[in-house]
Image: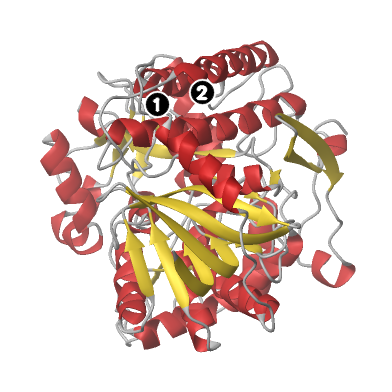
Amino acid sequence: MHESDLLIIGAGGAGMRAAISALGNGHNVNIVSKSLIGKAHTVMAEGGIAASVGDVDKDDNWTVHFADTVVEGVYIGNWRMAEILAKDAPERVYELERFGAVFDRTPDGKIMQRAFGGHTYRRLCHVGDKTGLEIIRTLEDKVLHTDTRIFDEVYITKLFVRNGRFCSALGLEMRTGEFLLFKAKALIIATGGCGRVYKITSNSWESTGDGLALAYNAGAELMDMEMIQFHPTGMVWPPGAKGLLVTESVRGEGGILLNSKHERFMLRYSPEKKELDARDVVARANYYEIKAGRCGPHGGVYLDISHKGRGFIMKKLPGMYSQFKEFAGVDITKEAMEVAPTVHYQMGGIRVNPYTCATSVEGIFAAGEVASGLHGANRLGGNSLADILVFGKLAGDGATEWMDGKEIVVPDESEVAKEIGRVRNFIRNGLNPYDLIDELASVMQNYMGIVRNGDDMRKAIDLIGNIRKRSEDIGVSGGLKYNHGLLGCLELQNMLVACESISVSANIREESRGAHTRSDFPKRRSEWKVNIVCRKNGENLSTKIVRVEEIPEELAKYVKPEVYENG
């Protein structure tokens, strides 16, 4: 057993920033990571941190960033969270610099900022095309110089709630096969997203929706789960690299999209913003060009930045040069990259309080990609790194303020024993969990993709239900120690929660809005300016529709009014 004031699940940017806040408030912290420390998915966010510091475009300010976030979230994001992000992001960037982060610089020594899709101004503070890696390096160094205990390669299987309040979490230490019980006054979930539920994704192996399912099974609400972001540009070749992210920095630094006819097709889809329109717009354009057959030999369109010259590319995009040279044998200083949409980010997640990041379960908080509210129906590039810094801090502050004066609640020993038995029971003869995981990912890719329709989504719901039923018979050989098959058994249960909530919510929303495009309901409709909320009801998923709160007049003046296509 391990006790602490605060337990944080997830050692990415949000989790470590939350830990820094809690430590600064005088509390002791345990951090649990499914992977190795420093391996967080934050490192895959390459382009930059969105913050209106105004070092490149002096007219930029928080009101413009706020408006961009609301508009590109297609008006269903939480306006309070958008306001908080826009106001706090500059200070979080300066703070990161004080912690030791080294940003690219303008000629006069200020932080360099680049353009990104959907942003009015050049707003992304960056470190070449390795910004996420620099964030992890900086925050990890800060945390490791404290007495924080970090437990890596530990998989949390269940959260325990007693009398409506969080009390502990059970983990399996993969190195030893031992069960660890983490007792704490409060918990922060910062586990990232669920991109691995799709076949083609930029997400690494850890992103299986674990935090979503842990919160859901503990009684917390999920929201906006239908909103899955397809990044416009993922690698399509070779097969082993399929889906690997091609950072938006390529377009931000001047890259253009071409089809097999060498047409710059974004001039047709978005003549004003072109390649720097919002991600959902560019992703759909790429999808339509590919569906129309105007694609390359591996089924993608072309992203070309070779016209900028080798020196520029090697300075601004060294990671992309290495990635394509190593994996695809393509020299991007001389030739175009072949790319296609790839699942990249979940806008939905655990429903939280915008000021404290508290969930609907006492003592449980959430921050980062696993939490919902900020991004609405579409996330702006660079807002994810701003999100983990701003709301990671707020989660740490919110959790420590909540737990002041509280004692640890003792978990029910019989519940802990029951959960240990459930995990052990997967060591048996049974169906291969990875066969079902592969089948589940194919269902999501084929029926819950970038363009959806009711028939496909209902088929997906039925197929997911069938996989859930068959998952009762999964089993693996071996023991508890370093058993990847056992990990697959545990992950499959969490992936099913994510897939069901995504598909059910998407089927309910009878319109096209942001990342959610329906061929049978192609227009955005005023009656669907709502959030769809999921929660566990017995053994079933239940939903409710919540009308989006209108932006108050003092903030609404900064935002262009929404125009509905149904009049």
Number of the label disc, if any, that sits on residue 444: 2
Q: Position of residue 394 (x, y in %)?
A: 61, 74
The answer for how far apart the CA atoms under marks 2 and 1 are is 8 Å
What amino acid does circle 1 point to? Lys
Find residue 403 and report its image quarter: bottom right
Secondary structure, mark 1, is loop
On the rendered structure, is 144 left or right of 79? left
Q: Position of residue 292 (x, y in %)?
A: 45, 15
What amino acid does circle 2 point to? Met
On the rendered structure, is 350 left or right of 210? right
* The N terminus lies in quadrant: bottom left
Residue 102 visible in the displayed image: yes
Q: Is residue 103 above or below residue 262?
A: below
Residue at (55%, 17%) from the top-left corner? 447
Secondary structure, mark 2, is helix
Q: Nearer the viewer, residue 406 or 383?
A: 406
Q: Nearer the viewer, residue 190 or 508?
A: 190
Q: Is residue 213 above or below residue 431?
A: below
Q: Position of residue 495 (x, y in %)?
A: 50, 33
* Residue at the front extreme, as displayed: 414
Residue at (37%, 40%) from the top-left corner? 202
**Decide: marks 2, 1 in contact (CB < 8 A)?**
yes
Q: Nearer the viewer, residue 276 or 159?
A: 159
First of labels 2, 1 by sequence position? 1
Q: Which residue is identified by label 1? A: 199
Residue at (30%, 64%) from the top-left corner? 133
Q: Position of residue 220 (x, y in %)?
A: 70, 49
